[in-house]
Amino acid sequence: MAGQADVTQPTDSSASPGAEQSLSPVRAYLLNCGSSSLADRAFSALMLVCALSIFAIVILILVELISGSKLTIQKFGMSFFFGSAWDPVNGNFGALPFIYGTVVSSILALIIAVPLAVGVAIFLTEMCPDWLRGFLAFFTELLAAIPSVVYGLWAIFVMVPLLRQFFYPYLIKSLGWTGIFGGPNYGFGMFSAGVILSIMVLPIISSLTREVMSAVPHAQREAVLALGATRWEMIRMGVLRNARIGIVGAVILGLGRALGETMAVTMVIGNRPEIVRSLLAPAYSMASVIANEFSEASDELYLSALIEIGLALFIVTIIVNALARVLVWAVTRGAPVRGT
Amino acid sequence: MASTTTAMPPPLRARASNRFLRVVVNHLATAAAVGSTILVMAPLIAIFMYLLFKGASSLNLAFFTQVPKPVGEVGGGMANSILGSGILLAIASLMGVPIGIAGGIYIAEYGRNKRLANMVRFTADVLNGVPSIVMGIAIYTLIVVPQKHFSALAGGVALGIMMIPTITRTTEEMLLMVPLNVREAALGLGVPNWRSVLSITLRTASPGVITGCMLAFARVAGETAPLLFTAFGNQFWSTSVNQPIAALPLQIFVYALSPYDEWHRLAWAGALVLIVLIVVSVALVRYVAGRGVLKGAS
Amino acid sequence: MGVEIEVSDLNAWYGTNHTLQSISLRIPANHATALIGPSGCGKSTFVRCLNRMHETNPIGRVTGTVRVGPTDIYAQASPVEIRRRIGMVFQRPNPFPTMSIYDNVASGLRLNGFRNRKVLDEVVERSLQQAALWDEVKNDLKKKSGASLSGGQQQRLCIARALAVDPEVMLMDEPASALDPVSTAKIEDLIFQLKSQYTIVIVTHNMQQAARVAENTGFFLNGKLVEFDATHKIFTNPTDKRTEDYITGRFG
């Protein structure tokens, strides 16, 4: 067995340990620097505390929301979410109209946005020439970053008048018999809220879908093509099938954004706390009622009701966003998402 | 790794009619994708152009230098809102940038593969999706109620806590791009770990980290909801941290809903200012990302 | 001046992979010692154990003793102090990309708080001269970034940076393997000049390189030290058959 311990000692030996060694100023300085372990530990502790602040923020919000809505939780309990009377004068509060408005406007937004967003994503990922892709991707990122209030401003002065003048009369005439497109043509109402929401969530769903589709390895595409598939078949079987979990995640993320969207919706939804059949009638969303009435809430119970709506919104969006992240991570392996 | 098996397509018969059908479907699909892109992009580009032109035609020098005139009078500007936004963003950045960067340093440098780091990452992402009005409520009960008045401080804090999760994530992403061999060079020299993280790793990633902060900055600059009952807004010139203060997006909201044409004009101009801010930051982020975080690193 | 390194019963793991098994040897001071062996035999891991870099990997583990001069480096808690006395040059040149040439060389001192401008200037010049890079960069010290040099120059810059902290030992992990032949020759000349002042340990794939620069050579195979002897003996008359097989090219 070749030796470790019995290795033949090579030529001459080192300087004896006791020999005089003149220390250069550099070496002398460095030897005196000392261990940095205290500074290192303090530093990593400080960084840790800052990282933990994320949890502190979530807990802070939860605590403040719960303590702020104590009054109405005690008074109404769960019936708060099923009551449809919103009567601040008499102290009677029910959140159902707002839940209805939030949910319906968001679903409407998704119905409009999802097919289009996926179509855009497919085009950009699989069919778009390179020179165009850069511009369109940049533009999509821009749109996702434009503030809500700017969308709302445009919606009030351009979108709603256009819809009211050209589109809604057509809807009332042709689909009025169904009952969901009836009544006076205010313009401001549930449908307009759904449209502006769809415009706002489309860039996000599209970007995320693109990311998810790009994460599908090329080998999958090539395998399908090698079997003689057309391009659409390759997209359908090689990409969409593998990415579908992530695409669902992207849609859910869009839903989360739509549920919580405040300013643009407030500016076009009409602000009437009633549940009516017609989608063209004014409605109200959870975020909108808070935005409109919070600073005017005249008594404790009123404020508590609004805060409880905020609590519900917080919990719902956390759950929806958590679900979306899990689904998207499953495909893209945890890379953070730009543009949200 | 999630197993992704491609299901075998049904046997592709070579019959002419079947082949023809598949080709037709392929063309239809292409048309649908192109069509939806045009259907989406054209109006969006139109919206964007409209905002630019309407804003530009509403903008003048007075916008930046004057406060709003009393109702009914022509002219005036949003100087107080711009200043107010500046003050709010300064407070928010003072809070959000250091804490956010430190949090990002932790999960990138000390927490790799640890469960805590993954939880921080996940929570930050989820927090980014929470409606900002909820932050406003929390800060209202936390700061405004005890103080019994609205204030720039409250607004700044509300915006600051919105910046933290965003900056944490972008900082982490940028730090992770610094290659291992650069860190090893610092370690091999006997540089203390904390010094290496700050002076080598963070410095190498700094273009990316800074643009991440800019992106968070631009995002909260346009936020209205959390300010509705924290900063509250102010028609007059104010520099005090302890009083209500105007903010650009907040005033745009108020002016848009008002019945006065002059105020509408101010709202369009203000919207343009916000859009320019967004365009500049998004463009800068893409520029930095395109050049690569590390100029010439091996 | 350099110091002797004595290694006793060194074992190293990557997770459950027992990468180094019971290594013992003595590396003489002021000499160049080459470590050769096929890919994956553990020679790089060994060298990284000498300056406690192996443990920077989350799944890396070390047992055994490494004595550098009079100091048992694993007895101390802080690896930072150890690494200040042992310089390392890596396989791929890794100058700090955001720093100028001057700042790169001075970094080991500056980042430990050293402030004296005059001494720094002298140290930078001395180190660059020792690394045979001074003449090529002396006019651009603060203007050019470390990353803007050619591959061979970058590696010499890294050598200068390591020399600037006046270490007692220089560890080199395949320093020329990513470089062209001209740069490689320059680096070998460098090692030749430096070895009288420092203890140099060089890991190399290139047996001719070992033969050119090192007085002693160790042959690693599958995590074990097979043979350690004077270079000329290893290459002309090795004791172990495995060494002979490797030298003559039967494997690796």
Image: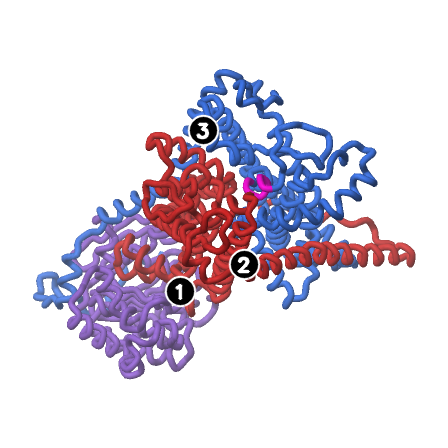
Chain colours: A blue, B red, C purple
Highlighted magenta segment, given as a residue range? A262-267
Looking at this view, is A51 or B70 the one in front? B70
Tell me the subunit letter for badge 3. A
Tell me the subunit letter for badge 2. B
| Marks 2 and 3 on same chain | no
- Residue C106, x across and y down, in percent: 24, 68
Label 1 Cα crowd, 10 Å radius (few <14 / some 14-19 / many 20+):
many
Question: Is residue B50 rendered to the left or right of residue B116?
Answer: right
Query: Label 3: which residue?
Result: A65
The kind of residue on which mark 3 rests is Leu
- Residue C174, x across and y down, in percent: 37, 68
Secondary structure, mark 2, is: helix
- Residue A149, x across and y down, in percent: 54, 47
Tell me the subunit letter for badge 1. C
Query: Label 1: which residue?
Result: C37
- Residue C230, x across and y down, in percent: 28, 70
Q: For the residues carrying marks 2 and 3, which lies nearer the camera in this image?
A: 2
Query: Which secondary structure class fits the magenta region best?
Result: helix
Label annotation for residue B58: 2
| Marks 1 and 2 on same chain | no
Structural distance between the alpha carbons of marks 1 and 2: 76 Å
Secondary structure, mark 1, is: loop
Secondary structure, mark 3, is: helix
Q: For the residues carrying marks 1 and 2, which lies nearer the camera in this image?
A: 2
Structural distance between the alpha carbons of marks 2 and 3: 41 Å
The kind of residue on which mark 2 rests is Ser
Say whether residue A82 is magenta: no
Residue under the point 43% across and 67% down: C245
